[in-house]
Amino acid sequence: MSMWQITPARRTVAAASLAAALALTLSACGEDQPKTETQIPSSSQRHTGDQGSGGERAKQPEQPAEDTVIATLHGPQGITLDVTSATRDSSGFVTVNGNLKNSSDEDFTDTAQWTGPELAMKRAAGDSLGGATLVDKAEKKRYYTLRDTENRPLATTGLGIVAANSAQKVFMQFPAPPKSTTDVDLQIPTFQAVSLTLTDA
């Protein structure tokens, strides 16, 4: 047989082999693709975005801690004072911090009594917590709020109106009782008194 007679036959066989190989490859690809589409990432893969470069989970920002209430004074018409600290410092003072709240739906305006009876302090500071006192029952002594040279108390001032459903931070500062005294009563006009344990700064 001549070369011209053999070549077409060989070409036919080669073409058939190539077509079979392509069909097999396409068939294999067609079987693998659905598996790829239905794969579900593992829990470790789903949380990869929460991890740092070292594989450790990223830390969430810390939320500020809320004030710890150590005592609550109850006043009139939904008024309360949550005491958050009563600290004796090395300078010989006691500072009481707290949150004054009005839980009613009406503004509270009768704050003048909290200033106490002294007219000089009322003229200097207006409505304030200047009438607060600390009572040392063991030593039988009462400590009044400190004041500056103009009779302004070292306490929260400007309390003409306590708005409905509101809260505000307040403070009062007193001379410190002897170190042997750890418990005192906090008294504010129109509020129920509470006992406080003093802590050192």
Image (spheres, grey):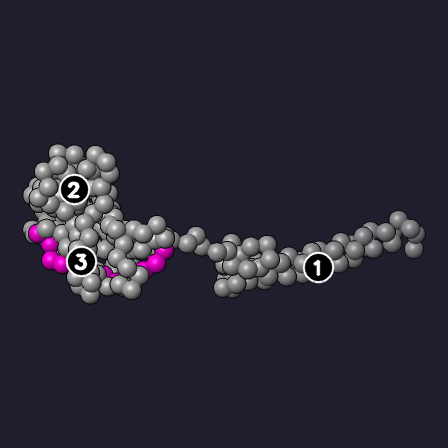
Residue 199: say if magenta. yes
Mark 2 and mark 1 residues within 8 Å of each other at the beta carbon: no
Residue matched to label 1:
20
Q: Earlier in the sequence, mark 2 or mark 1?
A: 1
Name the residue type under label 1.
Ala
Q: Nearer the viewer, residue 79 or 43?
A: 79
Where is residue 113, by image quadrant? Answer: top left
Depth order, front residue of 161/131: 131
Determine crowd level at label 3: few under 14, some 14-19, many 20+ residues with C-alpha closer than 10 A: few
Whether residue 164 is visible: no
> Which type of secondary structure does the marked residue at label 1 adopt?
helix
On the image, the x and y values in percent for residue 164 come to 12, 44
Q: Secondary structure at mark 3?
A: strand
Q: CA distance from mark 3 to mark 2?
A: 23 Å
* Amino acid tagged 2: Ser
Range drawn in magenta: 190-201
